Amino acid sequence: MISSILDHKNVALANIGWVILHVWIALEIEESMGFLAIVLLIGGIFALSYNSDGKLGRRIMLLPSLLYLLVLPAVIGSVTGEMESSGYAWLDVIGPIIWVLIIPVTLLASTQEWTGIGVTVE
């Protein structure tokens, strides 16, 4: 089960879904073309990872995985209630939960080559 959760294609698809939500956030909440450009770049990286084979796909996914660590202070602030509301109650609840799930899963999937976590033994 863990090998299918950490399969780079599944993780890339989950991140692409997260990127799609962030396109809406960039346009509706942030109203920032700079933020939108970053979101689209990260989405492109995950699309490239999805279309690449195993080892290469995971290595491509490593860059946004590490960049996700920069979001951790904001995620912690959201969880503890220290961050400003987005103006959407559902997003203030669901957003931090998804971040708390997607950051470690993406990190584990992208480092699977070195950690061996979730690798199927034949």
Image: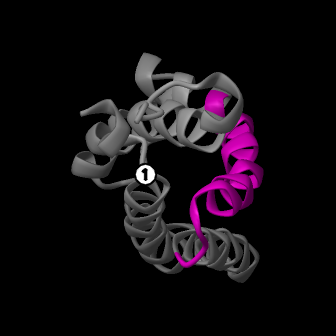
SS under mark 1: loop
In the figure, is residue 114 to the left or right of 52? right
- Pick whichever, 31 or 98, lies toward us: 98
- Pick whichever, 78 or 63, lies toward us: 63
Quadrant of the drawing holding the C terminus: top left
- Pick whichever, 18 or 30, lies toward us: 18
The magenta segment = 51-72
> Is residue 47 placed above or below 81 in the rendered structure?
below
Quadrant of the drawing holding the N terminus: top left
Q: Give the residue number, with chain letter if any, for mark 1.
A: 86
User: How was the colour assigned to the protein in this rendering?
Assistant: one colour
The residue depicted at 60 percent of the width and 35 percent of the height is 112
**Percent position (x, y) of residue 71?**
66, 39
Residue 67 magenta-highlighted? yes
Q: Amino acid at mark 1?
A: Ser
By secondary structure, the bulk of the magenta-drawn segment is best described as helix
Please tell me in which quadrant of the rendered image residue 54 appears.
Answer: bottom right
**Percent position (x, y) of residue 96?**
40, 36
> Is residue 57 placed above or below 64 in the rendered structure?
below
